Amino acid sequence: MLRTRLTDMLGIEHPVMLAGMGGVSYHRLVAAVSEAGGFGCLGAGAMTSEQMVDEIRKTKDLTDKPFGVDLLTALPDQMMQNVQLLIAEGAPVFVAALGVPSEVIDLCHDNNVLVVNMCGKVRHAVAAVEAGCDLVVAQGTEAGGHTGTVATFPLVPQIVDAVGERVPVVAAGGIFDGRGLAAALMLGADGVWVGTRFIATPEARSAPGYKDALLATGEDGTVVSRAFSGKPMRVVRNQTTQHYEEHPEELKPFPEQMMVAVGDGVLHLPQGDEAEGVDPQRECYPAGQGVGAIHEIVPAADLVHRFVEEAEAALARAAPTR
Ligand SMILES: Cc1cc2nc3c(=O)[nH]c(=O)nc-3n(C[C@H](O)[C@H](O)[C@H](O)COP(=O)(O)O)c2cc1C
């Protein structure tokens, strides 16, 4: 048993959190991770409010264990409305992918909902804790999806030093097995937040060709590109990223570039398995640098258990009897 401040705060068995990945982390995957004793998080960033409510209800049909809802929106009114809905539906944790206004935090706390903030820099973590967030995720540049510039190894202990006495810190970015969990604990984190590894599971929702692309991509096969949204996103390198590397003057700002990507037929993440006309050589497949370690599709519950067993073994190896 790896008991940490995180497991105590969330009321879970294992300090392994599923990242709230837009287009991917839907009810089947979220419930599988929570049922296995980890913490599932719905990626509601690309959902309508109705879809979000439906996904929360479907998750609750599959598990009684705690889970969270991750929202991307930068628009305060829309965030307030969605947070009110997730409170009404009984989700116990709200994850803000971007900053979170203090009224939203107060509303969550008045309703016993914990607030988590994704952070790529020390100052983001300090601001999040000062605003009242209950825990922070320190996400390094190795991460799949939208990402910053500081790597996980230096970022995590610096965020731990800045806010770790006040709130639990969760490490993210390039973590794909129990060695990564052990390393995160050694760096002072209280658990891990894992994205890419959980996409290669039977339960993950995914656009056609996505899981195959993960199995085929090596550790150097990702690139941070503005090609699909206008903001830096780590994805599998392909013809589309190559095109914009050669023609950066064609890039539009966020969110215009996202409309361009949809119009060009290279962004099907929100449609998941139902997407049609996907060309894997051009499609947006977000992935972290740990992708090179993914060689098989593994049920999500098995992954949660492997994370814990491997971390325990790694920690035992790191502290041999003297
Ligand atoms: C397909 C995909 C979609 C993502 N969407 C979101 C999102 O909507 N909100 C968010 O906070 N993070 C999002 N992320 C980032 C993850 O939350 C997480 O920080 C990242 O996956 C961790 O790194 P890893 O992929 O190396 O495990 C996404 C990542 C991926 C791979």
Image (spheres, rainbow, N blue to C red):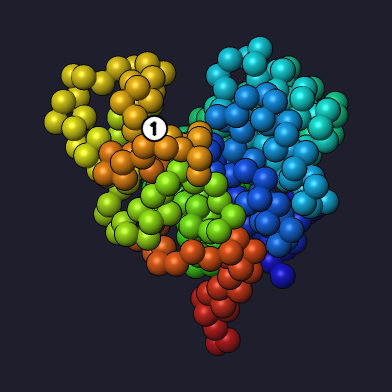
Residue 187 position within the rendered picture, expressed as x and y whole percent measured from the top left: 52, 57
Residue 17 position within the rendered picture, expressed as x and y whole percent measured from the top left: 63, 52
- Write the residue at 69% across / 66% down: 2
* Residue closer to the observer: 235 or 151: 235
**Residue 35 appears in the picture as rendered:** yes
Residue type for callout 1: Leu
Q: Quadrant of the C terminus?
A: bottom right
* Residue closer to the observer: 297 or 230: 297
- Write the residue at 38% across / 25% down: 262
* Residue closer to the observer: 67 or 14: 67
Q: Pick out the residue farthest to the front.
A: 276
Choose top left, top right, bottom left or bottom right for residue 291. Answer: bottom left
- Write the residue at 35% across / 53% down: 213
- Write the residue at 58% across / 15% down: 75
Neighbours of disc 1 within 10 Å: few (<14), some (14-19), many (20+): many
Q: Is residue 126 left or right of residue 293?
A: right
* Residue closer to the observer: 231 or 217: 217
Q: Is residue 299 left or right of residue 280?
A: right
Q: Pick out the residue farthest to the bottom.
A: 322
Residue 235 position within the rendered picture, expressed as x and y whole percent measured from the top left: 35, 42
The residue to which callout 1 is attached is 267
**Residue 191 appears in the picture as rendered:** no
- On screen, residue 203 above or below 41: below
* SS under mark 1: loop
Residue 294 position within the rendered picture, expressed as x and y whole percent measured from the top left: 41, 63
